């Protein structure tokens, strides 16, 4: 036997094997970076750099929603209930499902609550479910129906997830276009709405374990932020011993910018451009109505920043200015 030839063949074989292993390792590393969307029967799983960030639920639910929202360090930043039972959480407002868009008066129908007379937002189809190195995108079409199932309006929404920033901050851009189904559509004046999250119990302003704070772009804080207009609002507090926060940015092109904020001491955090008579204590109960004529549409855009620390350490004001100028 020629040992030199045998040794040469073995070297080639080992080289090929090592090459395959390195290629597989590189592929695994590539697969674990960026934003990966995994579509399932009832949800879309969203992973950031190989780790769960959130899931988009769209089937057999009163309205589509995101749950959980895992912030910097994978800390849970929204309440578990009613998606998951947790004895340490308040079981109020069962319609507060983590992250959602809804309104309490749509041609007079309540699509915010989940009572026997409430309407629903039903998923119709996916337009896009796309993973990417820098962003991942879920784009869907939906219909808003009353309790009898008649369609009030339709929406097309785009949810964009960005790869984490240098401070492990996580960003979600949410855009939604509403169009009447038949005749004019009235988004009625009510505080019950609209672009919302329900935060973790320890982040809330008040309550058994609440140690959070609220601040807005106008310098108002805590309870004074309710019903006020502002370009952005930030709600921060401790989770597992670390201070984290959620900031919501109102896009300058949105109708009625800057929006009013339906932000409560028990952890509800919502931008609502339709509740003027409630927020400003006006006698005209229709002061905040927004009518979308038949054949027309209206679009709203918001950015969510899940960050470490308070609004100052996270430089939320600076981040908002860059967002408003379209710089990021």
Image (cartoon, helix red, strand yellow):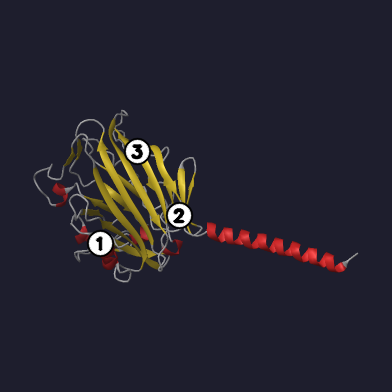
Question: In the rendered view of the protein, which quadrant contains the N terminus?
Answer: bottom right
Q: Quadrant of the C terminus?
A: bottom left
Left or right: 115 in relation to 8: left
Which of the two discs, 2 and 1, labels the residue nearer the N terminus?
Answer: 2
Among the two numbered marks 3 and 1 on one chain, the one whose residue lies closer to the N terminus: 3
Q: What numbered label is drawn on residue 233?
A: none
Q: Nearer the viewer, residue 33 or 203?
A: 33
Q: Separation of disc 3 and disc 1 at Cα? A: 30 Å
254 sits left or right of 77 in the view: left
Residue 202 in sight from this viewpoint: yes
Q: Camera-side residue: 155 or 277?
A: 155
Determine the residue located farthest toward the bottom in the rendered image.
313
In terms of image quadrants, where is residue 187?
A: top left
Residue 204 x %, y %: 32, 59
Residue on which disc 3 sits: 142
Q: Which residue is mark 2?
A: 132
Query: Separation of disc 2 and disc 3 at Cα?
Result: 24 Å
Label 2 – label 1 distance at C-alpha: 24 Å
Instruction: Identify whether 37 is placed above or below 237.
Output: above
x and y percentages locating residue 17 in the rendered image: 71, 61
Q: Which residue is mark 1?
A: 325
* SS type, badge 1: loop
Nearest the viewer among 211 and 321 is: 321
Do labels 2 and 3 touch, CB within 8 Å?
no
Q: Secondary structure at mark 2?
A: loop
Q: Does any portion of residue 84 appear in the rendered image?
A: no
């Amino acid at each position: 036997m020629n040992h030199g030839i045998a040794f040469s063949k073995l070297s080639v074989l080992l080289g090929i094997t090592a090459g395959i292993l390195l290629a597989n390792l590189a592929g695994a590393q590539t697969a674990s970076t960026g934003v990966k969307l995994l579509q399932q029967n009832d949800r879309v799983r969203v992973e950031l750099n190989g780790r769960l960030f959130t899931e988009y639920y769209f089937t057999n639910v009163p309205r589509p929603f995101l749950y959980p929202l895992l912030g910097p360090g994978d800390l849970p930043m929204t309440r578990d209930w009613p998606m998951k039972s947790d004895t340490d959480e308040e079981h109020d407002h069962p319609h507060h499902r983590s992250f959602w868009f809804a309104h309490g008066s749509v041609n007079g129908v309540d699509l915010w609550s989940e009572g026997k007379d409430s309407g629903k937002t039903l998923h119709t189809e996916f337009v896009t479910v796309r993973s990417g190195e820098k962003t991942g995108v879920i784009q869907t079409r939906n219909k808003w129906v009353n309790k009898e199932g008649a369609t009030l309006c339709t929406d097309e929404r785009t949810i964009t997830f960005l790869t984490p920033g240098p401070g492990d901050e996580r960003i979600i851009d949410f855009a939604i276009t509403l169009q009447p189904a038949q005749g004019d559509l009235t988004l009625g004046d009510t505080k019950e709405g609209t672009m919302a999250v329900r935060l973790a119990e320890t982040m809330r302003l008040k309550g058994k374990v609440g140690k959070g704070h609220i601040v807005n772009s106008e310098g108002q804080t805590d309870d004074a932020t309710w019903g006020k207009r502002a370009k952005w609002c930030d709600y921060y507090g401790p989770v597992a011993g670390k201070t984290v926060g959620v900031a919501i940015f109102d896009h300058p092109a949105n109708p009625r910018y800057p929006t009013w904020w339906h932000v409560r001491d028990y952890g509800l955090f919502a931008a609502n451009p339709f509740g003027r008579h409630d927020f400003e204590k006006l006698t005209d109960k229709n002061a905040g109505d927004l009518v979308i004529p038949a054949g027309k549409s209206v679009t709203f855009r918001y950015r969510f920043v899940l960050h470490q620390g308070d609004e100052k350490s996270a430089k939320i004001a600076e981040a908002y200015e860059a967002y408003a100028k379209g710089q990021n």
